[in-house]
Structure formats: C-alpha cells, structure tokens
C-alpha cells in the first residue's frame, strides 16, 4: 500500500477502507446466512429427495390421495396461494408473538432463578416436570377456557418454547467464572452492578441458543394449537383439507411451515452474529 | 500523578477472626496478616491451606510471596482482599483490588471499557469512565488498541489491560496473583520490566504472589518464602538493591539462590 500524499486523503482513505471492511463483513454475513438457509448441498439433497418421491408415486408406489407427488403439491401451492397466504399470516403472527412471549418469560424466569437460590431450588424441578405434561392435554382445555381466538395459541406456543430458553439462559448466567465475581467484589461492585456488567452479557449467547432450539418447535406448537380449536391458520387449513381429500393442499401447508421454521432459525442466527459479534471472534483456524 | 477516578481511598477495613470485633481505622496501614489459619472442606476432607501465616506490607512497599504449588498463596490474597475470613488470627488491610492469574477480560468489551470496568461497577457513566481510562491506555503502551476487543490483543496487551483495570479501581493495595504466569517467557521478562517502571511512577502497596523466584527478587522490596501446605512464612529476604535491577547482577543472583534454598531447592 502506498503512503497517502496528504494527511486529509489518508484520513479519508482510512474511513473508506473501514467502510469497505464493514461492507465486506456484511456481505460475508449475508452469504453465510443464505448458505445456512439454502446452500447448494441442501438444494441437491432436496432435489434428490423430491425426485425419488415423484418417481415412487408416478410408478404406482402410493395412492396420490395419500401421498401426493411433489408436482401436485407445487400446483396446490400456486392454486391455493391466496388461501395459504392469508392463513400463513395468521400462523406467522401466532409464532412470532408466541416466541417473543416465550423469550421474555424465559429471560425473566432465568434471571429470577439465578438471583434466588431458594427460588431455584423450589421452582426448577417443577419447571422440568411441567415439560412432561402433554400439550395435547392442555391445548383443548385452553380453548374451552379462552375460546377460539388468539390467546390459547399464544399460550401453547409460549409453553412449548420457553423451556429450552430458560435452561440455556440459566446455564449461561451460572457459567460466569467465579474469579470474575471475586474481582468485581474487590471493585466494590454491588450485586446489581455485577449482574448488569458481567453476568447478563455473558448469558446472551445462551439466550440465543435457547431461542434457536425453541424456534424449531414453534410451528409444531402453532399447528397443534390451531387444530385444538380455531377457524384460521395453516393448522386449520391442514385440518380442513384432509377430510376433503385435498391432500396436496395439506402438504403445501406443511411445506410453508417448514420453510418458515428454517427462515426464523436463519434470522436468529443472523441477529446473533450482528448483536454478539464477540461470540464469533475468530480463534484461529485449523488449516485443512 | 493520579488521574481522575484513580484517587486512593484511605479508609481501612479490618477483618478479624469471626468472634473478634470489627474495627474501622483511618490511618493507612498497608497490609497486616497475623498468625492466620484457614482451612477448606473438600471432598477428601478438611484441607488446611494456611497455618499460622503472617505477613506485613508497609504502605508503598512491594512484597513478593513465593512458595511451592498449593501452599495457600491465592488464599492469602483472597484474605487480604476480604473475600475470605480467617478461621483464626487477624487480617488488617487497606482496601485491596485483586488481579487474578488469568486476565479474565470481558470478551464483549473493548480495551477501554475493560480497563474502566471498576469505574463502571461503581456506577460512573460510560463516557466518563472511558474518558478516565483513555490516557492510561496510552501510558500502558496500548495506544491504537483502545477500541480492540480482547480477542484482537496479544497476551501481553491483555495482561496490561487487566492490570490497568485493577489499578483504576483506585485501591491503595494491589493483590497480584501470579500476574505473568500465563505469558510466554519473553513477554514475561518484558512485562516484569514494565511493571517495575510502572510501580516506580505509581507507588502502591503491592502483594505479589509468584512462583518465579527471580521475578520476586527483581520486583520486590521484600521476598516472603512460604512453606508447603499448610502455608506459613519460613523466610523473609530484604531486597535492598537499587532499581532498575538486572537479573544477572551477582547480588540478585545471590538473593535468588537464598530464596531457592529457603524453598528447599538447591541450585
């Protein structure tokens, strides 16, 4: 690199180089996310799977009413696009708000469990036990109690999603090096100050890990909640399509949900890398 | 010259064995550890870390503590920092800030925020704390790295940031727990020279725990040699040599040999 002729140019050059660096990092980040969403290897596997599926059905391996071939599902995706889209919006809203409620509740609970030994001893076992209660049992009761509206869906999704977030966040909070806590003590830091400056930031990667695990279950929970009683949403479309022998439409609904699940996972991964770059700092790569 | 935010507190806190009363004093007293016992309960039963340990560091004095592994050196520092209470005996110390063996920098903060952690911990607003830390970073040879996160710093730089963080806590006593043990041999030599010149400019009461006898003799006014567990003082060596000291100086070598002898190691 040649030395700049003037200091002004040099400063400008530095800014531009810094900008270019940021832009390059951004492009890399987007590429990485896109690869995560749909890399060529994934596409190849999907093509092979769909090809095998198509051949199997076309060669008479299964009744198309039971297992519609991929081209019929694609046809249904196109033909029923307005029906699927409007119901997707309903389900997507449930999932997004359900996840948000789950994350907020989980964070609050994790922090309380971390700060109070007593609470932790009392509540943690109950929390684990609560996950053994089948949602299949709770969801219809919630519908009876709260009706066909938005409320029961939100609760069911939050119930399914909040547990992994609590566990990973509590672990993150507890994983702070005890020597660091001693150090903060000798700095006269209050409990609140230590929590804010040391423990909470240290737990954020755990929070994101929990959310990435939870978000995969959110569509499942949404469908289940809708099937327990509703008049809209992709779960409802699925439930209505099966008895009408519109199997391709039911499969189309499932495809949309799967794609949405992958997208949410990718968005969370992207957000994590943007918000917590320090957790992704290169630690030296191994040559291959 | 002490910077803003690094002003020395002169309040003295005293911890005695639990049955004794707690006293507050106002004159600086350095560090006094008198006939302290401290034991821990582990899975393998009770382990006595310290047995009758005594140590004195006058205000502004640099005392190095050397001893075999597991002789209770870290326990001694935690007692001085009032993180532990002795089972018997007394610990009397000016407020002390700890510098742990590993740098333990927070990976999400840049060098400036890490150095300013003690100020932030006390509730100082971020910009003010950063402004207070910035001139020190330059003095610590970290100019140009103010906004680098720990992952982008070398081992020596990280250790300097960690040391600055402890210094900016503004305590009259620095409790250094093998501060250079994790560094490579060359960086360690460099950092020892750096610490010697820093303490010449910024005198503090220092209790330096180390397993490096040479480091102790080069840096300290006095070297305290501890016995194996349960740790107590077996020898005290005055290092009345002018600074800067060189490790090849025959007087330094002689003192090192005497310390090693007290540790039961013959050169």
Image (cartoon, coloured by chain):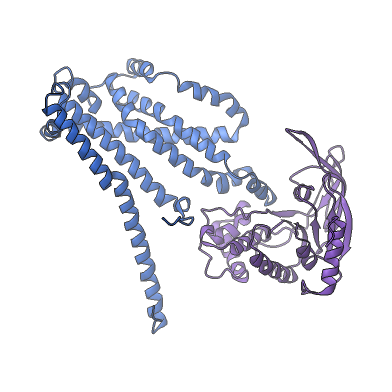
State whether residue B168 appears in this view: yes
Which residue is at a point 47% across and 44% down the rendered structure image?
A205
Q: Residue B264: x percent and y percent?
A: 86, 55
The image quarter in which residue A83 lies: top left
Q: Residue B214: x percent and y percent?
A: 77, 65
Say above or below: B155 vs A47: below
**Chain identifier matching the purple colour in the rendered picture:** B
Horizontal side, residue B235 vs residue B155: left or right: right
Q: Residue A123: x percent and y percent?
A: 55, 25
Horizontal side, residue B85 vs residue A129: left or right: right
Which residue is at a point 85% across and 66% down the rendered structure image?
B255
Say above or below: B10 vs A101: below
Q: Quadrant of the C terminus of chain B?
A: bottom right
Which residue is at a point 70% across and 50% down the rendered structure image?
A186
Q: Nearer the viewer, residue B119 or A57?
A: A57
For this orientation, the residue located farthest to the bottom is: A5
Q: Residue B79: x percent and y percent?
A: 78, 47
Q: Nearer the viewer, residue B26 or B196?
A: B196
Q: Quadrant of the N terminus of chain B?
A: bottom right
Say above or below: A111 vs B235: above
State whether residue B27 appears in this view: no
The image quarter in which residue A96 lies: top left
Which residue is at a point 23% across and 38% down the rendered structure image?
A46
Number of dots carrying numbers: 0
The image quarter in which residue B131 lies: bottom right
Q: Colour of chain A?
A: blue
């Amino acid at each position: 690199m040649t030395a700049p002729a003037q200091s002004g140019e040099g400063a400008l050059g530095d800014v531009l180089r810094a900008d270019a660096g940021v832009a390059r990092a951004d492009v890399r980040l987007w590429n990485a996310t896109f690869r995560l969403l749909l890399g060529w290897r994934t596409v190849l596997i999907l093509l092979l799977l769909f090809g095998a599926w198509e051949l199997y059905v076309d060669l008479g391996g299964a009744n198309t009413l039971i297992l519609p071939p991929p081209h019929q599902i694609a046809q249904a995706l196109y033909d029923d696009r307005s029906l699927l889209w409007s119901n997707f919006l309903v389900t997507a809203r449930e999932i997004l708000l359900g996840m948000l409620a789950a994350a907020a509740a989980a964070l609050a609970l994790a922090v309380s469990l971390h700060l109070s030994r007593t609470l932790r001893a009392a509540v943690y076992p109950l929390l684990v036990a609560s996950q053994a209660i089948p949602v299949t049992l709770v969801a219809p009761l919630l519908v009876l109690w709260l009706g066909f509206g938005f409320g029961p869906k939100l609760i069911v999704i939050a119930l399914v999603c909040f547990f992994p977030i609590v566990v990973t966040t509590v672990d993150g909070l507890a994983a702070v090096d005890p020597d660091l806590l001693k150090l903060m003590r000798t700095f006269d830091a209050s409990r609140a100050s230590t929590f804010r400056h040391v423990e909470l930031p240290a737990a954020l990667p755990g929070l994101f890990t929990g959310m990435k695990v939870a978000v995969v279950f959110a569509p499942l929970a949404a469908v289940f909640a809708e099937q327990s009683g509703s008049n809209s949403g992709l779960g409802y479309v699925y439930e209505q399509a099966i008895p009408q022998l519109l199997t391709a439409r039911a499969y189309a609904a499932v495809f949309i949900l799967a794609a949405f699940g992958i997208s949410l996972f990718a968005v969370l991964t992207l957000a994590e890398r943007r918000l917590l770059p320090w957790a992704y700092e290169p630690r030296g790569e191994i040559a291959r | 010259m002490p910077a803003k935010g690094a002003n020395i507190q002169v309040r003295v806190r005293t911890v005695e064995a639990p049955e004794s009363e707690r006293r507050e004093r106002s004159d600086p007293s350095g560090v006094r550890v008198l006939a302290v016992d401290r034991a821990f309960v582990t899975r393998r039963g009770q382990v006595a870390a310290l047995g009758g340990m005594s140590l004195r560091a006058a205000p502004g004095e640099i005392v190095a503590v050397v001893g075999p592994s597991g002789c209770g050196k870290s326990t001694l520092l935690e007692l001085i920092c009032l993180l532990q209470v002795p089972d018997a005996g007394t610990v009397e110390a000016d407020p002390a800030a700890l510098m742990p063996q590993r740098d333990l920098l927070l990976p999400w903060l840049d060098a400036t925020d890490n150095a300013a952690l003690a100020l932030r911990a006390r509730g100082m607003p971020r910009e003010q704390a950063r402004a207070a830390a910035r001139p020190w970073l330059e003095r610590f040879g970290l100019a140009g790295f103010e906004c680098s996160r720990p992952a982008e710093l070398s081992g020596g730089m990280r250790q300097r940031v960690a040391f600055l963080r402890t210094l900016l806590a503004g305590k009259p006593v620095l409790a250094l727990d093998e501060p250079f043990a994790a560094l490579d041999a060359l960086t360690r030599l460099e950092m020892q020279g750096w610490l010697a010149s820093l303490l010449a400019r910024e005198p503090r009461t220092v209790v330096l725990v180390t397993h490096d006898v040479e480091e102790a003799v080069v840096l300290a006014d006095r070297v305290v040699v501890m016995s194996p567990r349960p740790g107590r003082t077996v020898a005290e060596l005055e290092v009345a040599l002018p600074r800067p000291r060189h490790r090849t100086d025959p007087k330094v070598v002689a003192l090192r040999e005497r310390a090693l002898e007290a540790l039961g190691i013959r050169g």
